[in-house]
Amino acid sequence: MKIWQGLIFGSLFGLSSCTVLDRGLLHQPGKDYQDIRDYESNYGSRIEVFLDIAETELVENYKKKKFLMIRKDQPRAVVHPRKDLSLRQFIDSAYDAGDISKDEWDRYTARCEDLHTLWQKQWRSADKKARILGYKR
């Protein structure tokens, strides 16, 4: 099954790359990688990406480790750690350096609060289920 998927993907990729080469879309000299340079210097867009990734990781980690969170009596930072703490430090340092504005700082710290609220909700749910099942906390 996987061999067929690889062959189909390879043939589709090959056809699309030939189209790109024929049209001359592979390299556009006018852009000169400006998008990449803009992304590197734009802290706001990077922070937004990091916040999105952190939220996705919280949701996926909870789905994967929900049973461990219920059953094991381990430190929370080990089983299902908070994602907002390191992001808050990064946001504060970017604001202190003048890389983001006050409005961006407010918006990003609000998203960090949302991440913390989600983390607390997940742990409350796990603790409640553990008590129902009779596990000691």
Image: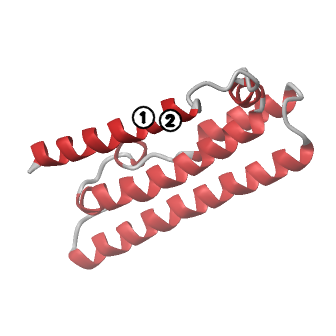
Residue at coordinates 64% horizontally, 39% vertically from top-left? 87
Helix, strand or loop status at disc 1: helix
In the depicted structure, whether residue 122 falls above or below residue 88? below
Horizontal side of residue 103 vs 47, given as left or right:
right
Closer to the camera in the image, 103 or 8: 8
Mark seen at residue 125: none
Marks 1 and 2 in Cβ contact (< 8 Å): yes
Residue 69 showing in the rendered view: no
Closer to the camera in the image, 15 or 55: 15
Residue at coordinates 75% horizontally, 25% vertically from top-left? 34
Residue that mark 1 sits on = 17
Callout 2 amino acid: Val
Mark seen at residue 20: 2
Give coordinates of residue 13: x percent, y percent. 35, 39
In the depicted structure, whether residue 122 falls above or below residue 27? below
Residue at coordinates 30% horizontally, 61% vertically from top-left? 66
Give coordinates of residue 82: x percent, y percent. 51, 47
Residue at coordinates 89% horizontally, 29% vertically from top-left? 98
User: How many other residues sit within 10 Å of disc 2, few (<14), some (14-19) or many (≥20)?
Assistant: few
Callout 1 amino acid: Ser
Horizontal side of residue 33 vs 102, given as left or right:
left
Give coordinates of residue 7: x percent, y percent. 18, 42
